Image (cartoon, grey):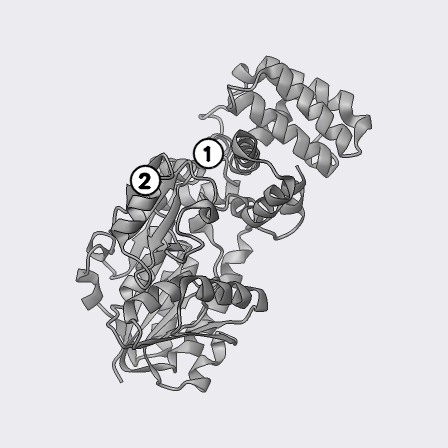
Amino acid sequence: MEVLQRVEATDAFANLLLDARLKQSGLAGPDRALATELVYGVLRWRGMLDWILSRVLDRPLLLLDRPVRQVLRLGAYQLCCLTRIPDFAAVDQSVRLVRRARAGKSAGFVNAVLRAVARRRDELEPDPFADPVGYWTTVGSHPRWLVERWMARLGPEEAGRLMAANNAVPPVTVLANALKTRAEDVLSALLGAVPDVVTGRFLPEAFSVWGAGGVTDLPGFAEGWLIPMDEGGAFPVLALDLSPGQRVLDACAGGGSKSALIAARVGPEGEVVALDSSPRALRRLEAAVSRLGLTRVRPHLEDARRAGALWPGQFSRVLLDAPCTGLGTIRRRPEIKWRRVPDDLARAAALQGELLAGVAGAVAEGGLLVYSTCSLEPEETDAVIAAFLALHPEFRVDATWQSLPPAHDLVDGDGHLRAWPHRHGTDGFFVACLLRTR
């Protein structure tokens, strides 16, 4: 409950809070797995849970104190989604939890509400004909504005498949660090430790793992064998069309996963200049560089908008994995869908345009500038590229990289790559490859 309260009250990500809390708690095995399922289950299905609770409450859910609200969601999730937990146990634990949260005066209220949910859950079903958008908002458990947007863009059937993919539990996905090991050795180590391992659909060095807990629990993580990354996250690096010895700018490096993959591809003779404007992100990057043994990655605390002025024309390859709304990563970070609002799209696009213009000057003539986002919304993708090209005639969309496997299976007619959770089984990613011609 503490994690859910902090996620709702702040911009913190559930995965980071939950990992820290689990380490403090000492929980292991089934208890750890149940805690993880409860947190992510409530975040994924909050829309449905809130609708169910609204049918039995005598007041708006949002008017309740936050601890009471979270206890009700946790209890409703156990009653409606976890068949292995008896009703009496779910209700009893919820009452105990609200008392521990110093909201004991609400214990009777919580008990009554959850007993009503248990009695009526089979009859609580929204009407798909009276309000189709509202139906998918509830059954698909996404905010109404996203449902409206995706239904208009994709149609009801495909929008429903996208929401279902967002609500599915994703695997832990890693790439083998070619600087330290071979893909076959990683596969062998994983198969010896976890119950379900699948080789990547698009990349032979990628592995999806189910039933393993967190990525740090996997064999080879501490030794630097593993780069945590969804297959979709590797597509921007693929678009760079790298060769050994190249000098590459990773303009918004974040935690360093893409810098690590770039470093593995340019080899010991190459160099990766990795920028981030966040000291916290840079610390994570430096930790990843150390763990993965990346001697040719150069971290810099710097705003990418200054890259062109600092390194004019000095890179044959530049990656801008731009900050975005993250709406393509809902399956891994379900809290994002409840946190974002429509105005966030315009705010993100404005920053993305500034960053793209700022890094453009660092690209050498004949070099490639790759722009990517983990969002597929038009404002953050096509519109940003169109606005940039209108102001920068020295760049054009590059088509040569699109023949590289697996890119040709994902590229649209406009020459941009779009990976969708429901179509490709990856996080949602957009990639545009721009060639500097003069």
Q: In which quadrant is the N terminus drawn?
A: top right
Mark 1: which amino acid? Gly
- Packing grade of label 1 (10 A; few <14, some 14-19, many >=20) is many
Question: Does residue 57 appear in this view?
Answer: no
Kindly report which numbered mark, 1 or 2, lies closer to the viewer in this rendering. Answer: 2
Question: Does residue 391 appear in this view?
Answer: yes
User: Is 190 in front, or is 348?
Assistant: 190
Q: Who comes first in sequence, dot 1 or dot 2? A: 1
Residue 191: give its label: 2
- Packing grade of label 2 (10 A; few <14, some 14-19, many >=20) is some
Residue at 30% across, 81% down: 394
Side of 278 relative to 386 (left or right): right
Q: Indicate whether 403 appears above or below 128.
A: below
User: Is 131 in front, or is 73?
Assistant: 73
Q: Outermost residue, right direction?
A: 105
**Mark 1 and mark 2: Cα distance apart in space:** 34 Å
Q: Which residue is mark 1?
A: 140
- Residue 129 percent across, percent down from the top left: 44, 25
- Residue 84 percent across, percent down from the top left: 51, 19
Residue at 28% across, 60% down: 416
Q: Indicate whether 280 appears above or below 227.
A: below
Q: Indicate whether 182 appears above or below 364.
A: above
Q: Outermost residue, top direction?
A: 119
Give residue 266's quadrant in the image: bottom left
- Residue 12 percent across, percent down from the top left: 60, 52
Mark 2: which amino acid? Leu
